[in-house]
Amino acid sequence: MSSSPGIKPQENVDMMYISIETAIALASVLGNVLVVVVVCVNRALRNTTFCFIVSLAVADIAVGVLVIPLAIIINLGFHTQFYTCLFLSCLLLIITQGSILSLLAIAIDRYLRVKIPTKYNTIVTMRRAYVVVFLCWILSFLTGLVPMIGWNNRDALGNLSSSSDIVCAFTTVMRMDYMVYFNFFGWVVVPLSIMIALYAEIFRVIRRQLNKRAEATSDHDRYLRKELKLAKSLALVVFLFAVCWLPIHIMNCMTYFCPECGIPKFAMYTGIFMSHVNSALNPMVYAFRIERFRVTLIQITRRCMLCKPTEPTPCPISTPALAEKADVNI
C-alpha cells in the first residue's frame, strides 16, 4: 500500500508512534488513578503492600502525564539548550527508577510477610512503609540526575557554549556507558535479580508449608493459599516489567557495544512504547487477579461512572473486622 501524496514513509512511522503513545498515556493515567482511588476508598487495602503499590501507581501516572509527552518531544527532535534536553531526559530515568524501586519494596514486603509472619506487623509498620517510599523516590532522583553532574555527552559535542541550541535527542545528550553499566546493569538487572530470588523464596516457603497439611489448620491453609495467590499476582507485575523494559535496554547495549549495528527507527519506537505500555498493564493485573481490588473497582464504576447505586456484595468495601485482617483477605 502506497503512502498518501506528500507524506513521507518516516512521517507515517512518526504519526503512528505518536498515536500509539497517546493511547498508552490515556490508559496509563486512567487505570492508575483508579488504583489510587480504590486503595483510598477501601480501608481494608490500606496496608504496607498497597502503600508500595500506590507508589508504583504514582510512577505509572507520571509515565502517562510526563514521560510519554517528553519521549515524543525528545524522539521527534526539537531545538533547545544542552542541559535543558539533558534534564528532560533525566526525568524519564527518575520515574523509571521510581517504578523499579517500588517493585523491589513490594517484593521485600511480601518476603518478610511469609518469612517472619509473627514479627511482621511489629517490624513493617505503615510509618516505616512511608519512609521506605520516600527513600525510594529520593534514591530515584539521585541516580536519575547523575548525568546532570557530568556523566553526559557534552564533551563529545565539541566546543558547545551554554547558549548554543542542539536538536534534542536522548542519545545526543545521554552517554551510552551510563545507560548500559550504571542504569541497566546497576539499577535494572540487579534489582530484578533480587526480586526474582525473593519471589522464588516466597513460593518455596509457602509451598513447603502447604505440603505440611497434617500440621496446618484449615484457616492457616486458607491464609497460605491467599498469600500464594497474591505473591503470584505481584510476581506477574515484575515479569511484565522485565518483558516490557528489556527490549529497549538490549537495544541500548547494542548501540554501545556495536555502534556499527544500525537499529531501525521502527524497532526503537517499538521498544520505547513497550516500556511505556507496562504502566497501563499493572491496573489490569490488580483488577483481574486481586478479588478485593476488583470488587471495589466494580462498585466505584457503578456509583461514579454509571450513576447506579452499589449493591450489597459478599465482599463489602470495608468493615473494622476486615480492615484488621487485610493481609489475610486480599
Image (cartoon, grey):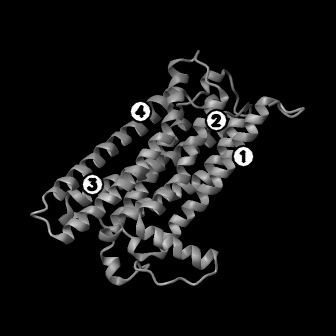
**Residue 217, percent across and down?**
15, 69
Of the residues shown, which amino acid type is indicated by label 3? Answer: Tyr
Of the residues shown, which amino acid type is indicated by label 1? Answer: Ser
Q: CA distance from mark 2 to mark 1?
A: 12 Å
Question: From the viewer's perspective, is the residue at label 2 or at label 4 nearer?
Answer: 2
Category of crowding for the residue at label 3, using alpha-carbon neighbours closer than 10 angstroms: few (below 14), some (14–19), many (at least 20): many
Q: CA distance from mark 2 to mark 4?
A: 22 Å
Mark number, residue 19: 1
Category of crowding for the residue at label 2, using alpha-carbon neighbours closer than 10 angstroms: few (below 14), some (14–19), many (at least 20): many
**Residue 112, percent across and down?**
25, 57
Q: CA distance from mark 1 to mark 4?
A: 32 Å
Question: According to the image, label 4 marks what residue?
Answer: 185
- Above-or-below relation of 314 to 11: below
Name which of mark 2 and mark 3 comes first in the sequence. 3
- Camera-nearest residue between 58 and 3: 3
Q: Secondary structure at mark 2?
A: helix
Question: According to the image, label 2 marks what residue?
Answer: 269
- Camera-nearest residue between 320 and 286: 286
Question: According to the image, label 3 marks what residue?
Answer: 111
